[in-house]
Image (tube, rainbow, N blue to C red):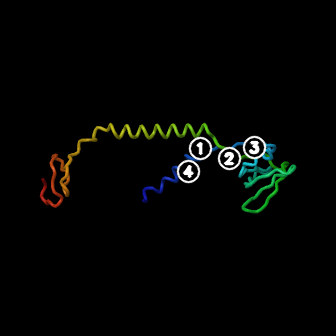
Amino acid sequence: MRHLRWIPLLASPILANCHSVRPVQPADLSARASLQRVWVTRSDRSTVVLDEPRLAGDTLTGLTNGEPQSIPLSDATVIRSRQPAPGRTVMLAILAGAATLGTLFYLEHRPDVGNAAFCGAAIGSRPNPFGNCCLLEDTTPC
């Protein structure tokens, strides 16, 4: 199973392409209750992550590391949220399908496929370079 460790490393950037981070207007925060997380960049260039953001008057409230936090809108220069990117998702699915089909086509049409000797039902036998089968217990070359 050691050879499967790289799959999450490969899958993370691929799945990240199904979303994009876009700016959000403060008016959108009161209209959209579906936003789970926003990134607020302050005027001092620091970034605060707010979970469950809500707009109350001119103040953005939410949770940061489980603690309540309030940020005045006058202090926020950019508010961003992660949103689905259906175009990227479709393109990713098309590219993954094409890569899979291309790999299968290549593997099926390799010139060295199909040239191995087949020993049939002989249990304990193996093919040798001369095309006939030898028993595995044989110590002398066939």
Q: Secondary structure at mark 3?
A: loop
Q: Is residue 85 left or right of residue 48?
A: left
What percent of the width, then of the height, locates residue 51? 73, 55
Q: CA distance from mark 2 to mark 4?
A: 15 Å
Q: Which residue is mark 4?
A: 12
Disc number at residue 82? 2
Q: Residues within 10 Å of mark 4 (few under 14, many from 20)?
A: few
Q: Which residue is mark 3?
A: 24
- Which residue is pictured at 81% across the width and 52% down the height? 60
Q: Secondary structure at mark 1?
A: loop
Q: Is residue 67 left or right of residue 125?
A: right
What percent of the width, then of the height, locates residue 103? 40, 40
Q: CA distance from mark 3 to mark 4?
A: 25 Å
Q: Secondary structure at mark 4?
A: helix
Kindly check if marks 2 and 4 are in contact, taking CB atoms under 8 A apart as contact. Answer: no
Q: Mark 1: which amino acid?
A: Asn
Q: Mark 3: which amino acid?
A: Val
Q: Mark 4: which amino acid?
A: Ser
Quarter of the N terminus within the rendering: bottom left
Q: Secondary structure at mark 2?
A: strand
- Which residue is pictured at 73% across the width and 43% down the height? 23
Q: Which residue is mark 1?
A: 17
Q: CA distance from mark 4 to mark 1?
A: 9 Å
Query: Quadrant of the rendered structure where residue 70 is?
Result: bottom right
Query: Quadrant of the rendered structure where residue 3 is?
Result: bottom left
Q: CA distance from mark 3 to mark 2?
A: 10 Å
Lower position in the chain sequence, tag 3 or tag 2 = 3
